[in-house]
Amino acid sequence: MDKRLERILPRVQKPARYTGGEYNQIIKDKQKVDLRVAFCFPDTYEIGMSNLGMSILYHTMNSLPYVWCERVFAPWGDMYEEMKKAELPLYALESGDSLDQFDVLAFSIGYEMAYTTVLDMIDQAGLPLRSAERTALLPLVFAGGSAAVNAEPMADFLDLFVIGEGEEMNNDLLALLHTAKTEGWDKPEFLRRAAQIGGVYVPSLYDIAYHPDGTVASITPRDGAPERVTKRIVVDLDSAPYPVNPVVPSTEVVHDRVNLELFRGCVRGCRFCQAGYIYRPIRAKKPETLVKQGIEALKNTGHEDVTLLSLSTSDYRPLPALCDGLLDYCESRSIGLSLPSLRADNFSMEIMEKLQKVRKSGLTFAVEGGSQRLRDAINKNVTEGDLLHTCAIAFAGGWNSVKLYYMLGLPTETDEDIVGIADMAGRILHCWRENAKNKNRGVKITVSTSCFIPKPHSPFQWEPQITREEYLRRVNLLRASINSRSVVYNWHDADTSVVEAVLSRGDRRLGPVLEEVWKNGGRLEAWSDYFRFDRWMNALDKFGLTAAFYAERERSVEEVLPWDMIDVGVRKAHLVKERERCYSSTLSPDCRHQCSACGALRLMEGGKCDG
Amino acid sequence: MDKLRLRFEKTGRAVWISHLDLMHTMQRAFSRAGYALKYSEGFNPHPQISIALPLSVGVGSYCELMDFRLNGDTALAALPARLTAVMPEGIRVTDCYEQVNKFALLKYLEIRGSFEYDERPAGEMAEELTRFFAQPEIVIEKKTKRGLGQSDIKPAIREIAFEAGEGEVLLHAVISAQEPTLNPALLPDALRQLKPALAPDFAKFTRIENYLENMQVFR
């Protein structure tokens, strides 16, 4: 171990997250590999080690014999300060080698608020921030993850982006880089060729022109780069790689458990939800595959919990069979099975009872809108009747805590809708009084609101965000409407939402803003400990930009959007249609009832959408 | 099966795993190796494992002891290798046997340490350290549950010797493990308080062996 590191570790919180050496880590002989990949997660170890995508891609990249892929996480503030003081550069956990010994820095970006941490990690690797200033072929610095569907604010800093699912695409890219390194190509040649790989977006091969008002005038590809980069997907999830031997952290992380992914995509089409559109088409795994992989992973890790992951667990058709298969193994071994993302509308007694056998947790419902009209407008297909029915079963079954999540500021929301949230909480309280078996224990109903953020590639991508002041007015209206002590109201601050709204629909002109925020100490800004609203506003100001331009402005459907070169499968015309249906509060049937021909199916040659 | 005892090493990168995390790591390792730990009865069942004298984070050991119970019988001879195969780097199980002595009888710890000096000559320091720890009493300020207190650490040091190495002074000592407990970190702390000129730039420790009151090896 590096002497400097050894002296720092006794002084920092939770040192085990900085040492590596965990069970199932992948160690290779660095003399015998041709490409060393630093897989960088721009957040802490505890968050990154809970991320299934990170775990899958760590294994797929390491499946290439000529590649050794190691993990790198962002140090927490105390460690960061100590590393600066000791002049200890950022290092990878497996080998402990500093990042200057790597051929590739690959970032996984799931959230816009991680952008400044990406810059910070590039800097801690001792590299210039901007792609144009890194003239050599190696190290290649690229990124993927759900934030890459609008990569424009980060376009100056990364050599390329991978759009969509990385299982196959990353390895295609690494194979090309392997050839490039062996044959001694220069960076421009490599980037030109990489742009021909499906799903690879090379921002430097696209010229962006702006209108005087700041909107995008045109996007022009050069050197044979495709006009639109189409998202890559994995067609058959049953045969797709799944790590049954994931790294087992030696210290507590956020999700200490085996994660099983039921399916990708979502049949629901909630109009505010980016994930519901960018992960289409719907592809499910067979329950047999999941049971087999789940048991194997439990054996290989020794975890005491297994969780079923998807955007909407209740929409997994063979859910009862899957639960039976897993519970057969789990119950006798005291292994907990948890099912997040259940819907209120088809939450069955059967599933609930199955879970009760192992462990009982609180009920959480994402209701999103306070009235049926608003829920129809956003296509959140939950009725109050379903919700009350589900709660009645749950209260009768002994549950006594319910969490309800809403967004304020959704398109078409009125004050009546906001007061409706308080009314609904009141009716759930009434439902508890009528159904609870043991009233002595009391009930806790928690209402939480956050500020709606319009996201690219969703039907609301053209919508304005409400201002901070307006959000606070709506929060106060709701506070005043809640008058029971059993109902607790929590609201998220709108400050982060504003910055997130700017970044998620931002363009390349935000590059200097990100750099400025980083220069002024911005990193790990997904954490309220480190987030500073003023730092962002000052940086925007410095470059003559405003948050309002990006966040609060309604965009015309004719406007060229900064992310128009990215094709996630769903056609723009479908998004336009869905947005129009919002204004007439018209529900769209879910994919199971009627295919909307959204366009995502064309991503899947010969495949069948499970919608 | 009755109370079993595991002897294991915790060295290298594993020294940074905290006591609580180690308990969890052990639990998972048993599960990976296919051993069913016996759980407590009751509302929130947990495996019945206990580790003697929890190590401070950063301290290594060649002589950790952990008591546990298993459901059903097993061949104890095979257990160390099977467990070691599923451990994180730095944890190696060296023995497994039925418990003989209660942990309360563990009296002394043999430790080795390294006091690193970046600027000062190790030879000179080794002599000075020997002289310092030969004093009849070494009274330091120590944080206790009731706030700051005065404490003489000398009676807890049974043997201590220093030897000059390369940029470091090697320490070899036998200290009291229980009643009173001497945390080895108090040795450089004493220097910082009473003779800063001798305080090392960095100190680290490793446990070597456990002893009974009569200096027989504690098993």
Image (tube, coloured by chain):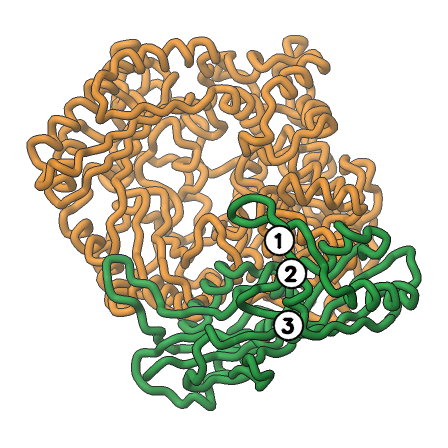
Chain colours: A orange, B green
Q: Which residue is mark 1?
A: A15
Q: Nearer the viewer, mark 2 or mark 1?
A: 2
Q: Chain of mark 1?
A: A
Q: Residue at x 71, y 48 (%)?
A: A193
- Rendered image quadrant of residue A529: top right
Type of the residue with mark 1: Pro
Type of the residue with mark 3: Arg
State the residue lying farthest toward the left. A434
Q: Residue at x 39, y 53 (%)?
A: A261
Q: Residue at x 29, y 62 (%)?
A: B45
Q: Which residue is mark 3?
A: B207
- Rendered image quadrant of residue A23: bottom right
In the image, A475 versus B9, the foreground residue is: B9
In this picture, residue B172 sits left or right of residue B211: right
Q: Residue at x 55, y 36 (%)?
A: A147
Q: Chain of mark 2?
A: B
Label 1, secondary structure: give it: helix
Measured along the vertical axis of the image, is residue B36 above or below residue A567?
A: below
Contact check, label 1 and label 3, Cβ < 8 Å: no
Q: Which residue is mark 2?
A: B58
Measured along the vertical axis of the image, is residue A565 above or below residue A370?
A: below
Q: Position of residue A535 (x, y in %)?
A: 65, 20
Q: Position of residue A368 (x, y in %)?
A: 31, 26
Query: Which quadrant is the N terminus of chain A positioned in?
Result: bottom right
